[in-house]
Amino acid sequence: MRFVVIDVETANPQMRSICQIGVVGFEDGREVFADSTLIDPEDYFAPFNERLHGIGPSKVVGAPAFSQARAWIAERLQDQIAISHSAFDRLALRQAAARYEVEDVNCRWLDSLMVARRAWPSLAAEGYGLATLASAFGIKFQHHDALEDARAAGLIMLRAIDESGVDLEGWFDRCAAPPRSHKSVARTGDGDGPLLGEVVVITGTLSLPRQKVADLVHEAGGAVDSSVTKRTTLLVVGDQDVSRLAGKDRSAKQVKAEQLMESGLAIRIIQETDLQALIN
């Protein structure tokens, strides 16, 4: 049984702006390697992202751009079972590869968040975020460090395999089961899919009506709230509003999300096209 776990940190709300990658390999129930590298995102660092993970422009001086680090990534992920905790990390890699017009690494992806939801349904009320699961299982780690996050996700995956008796191939089968159909448009998070465990808030001008976006989120397993609270995990901003993240004219929801992020809550701010890519 061998798999690798990957986690990325980003410089700003655009997922392609990767500034750190952490990869941890596991074989037969134990860690066999752990590597990380800083990446020059060749993009701006949003203040709240910098405060979240502590990586800024000065730390990536001399670091490779994503295109230059592609071989480093492939050496560790190519043709492997690759695990990420939610779809964000693999989508970030895909979008960075598209930006630099380099080939995406070929591997089999498994989502440890989807695994956790099936392995421990009793934890639904607390949620399946990495920090929440780590706390529940006594896993100590430094959140928002890519290497530490990858290791924590790997330990959670090992625990799910051990407690359930389901091996990796079995988890691929269980996670591939189709989501339950929804006859109601209620924005609860009782579904299944790439947004399971997420509590989404929408702000800004979108290309689709907000009601349609809320339905899509719900069908992808996520809950939708009308305002930003301590339970919010994802703020979706209209694409044309992303550039404002580094300046003024931010919405009240956006400002509150940033304040909660600074207090230590794990909230991500992404643009509408990234949300659609996640759902699709």
Image (cartoon, rainbow, N blue to C red):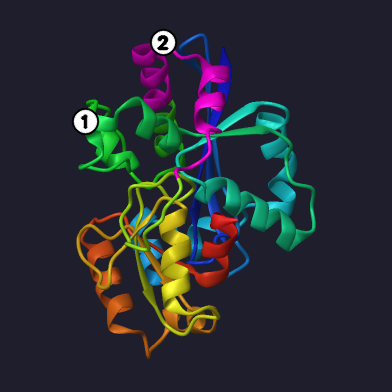
The stretch of residues the image draws in magenta is 155-180
Q: Secondary structure at mark 2?
A: loop
Q: Position of residue 140 (x, y in %)?
A: 26, 31
Category of crowding for the residue at label 1, using alpha-carbon neighbours closer than 10 angstroms: few (below 14), some (14–19), many (at least 20): few
Q: Nearer the viewer, residue 216 or 148?
A: 216
Q: Residue at x 74, y 46 (%)?
A: 104
In the rendered structure, the answer to whether residue 48 lies left or right of residue 82 reads left
Q: Quadrant of the N terminus?
A: top right
Q: CA distance from mark 1 to mark 2?
A: 20 Å
Q: Of marks 1 and 2, which one's residue comes earlier in the chain?
A: 1
Q: Residue at x 46, y 13 (%)?
A: 30
Residue 174 magenta-highlighted:
yes
Q: Is residue 205 visible?
A: yes
Vertical relation: 125 (above or below) 16: above
Most common secondary structure along the magenta stretch: helix
The residue labelled by disc 1 is: 136
Q: Secondary structure at mark 1?
A: helix
Query: Amino acid type of disc 1?
Result: Ala
Q: Nearer the viewer, residue 270 or 170?
A: 170
Q: Position of residue 71 (x, y in %)?
A: 75, 40
Q: Position of residue 65 (x, y in %)?
A: 67, 56
Q: Position of residue 31 (x, y in %)?
A: 47, 17
Category of crowding for the residue at label 2, using alpha-carbon neighbours closer than 10 angstroms: few (below 14), some (14–19), many (at least 20): few
Tell me where residue 154 sits by quadrant.
top left
Tell me where residue 27 sits by quadrant.
top right
Q: Is residue 65 visible?
A: no
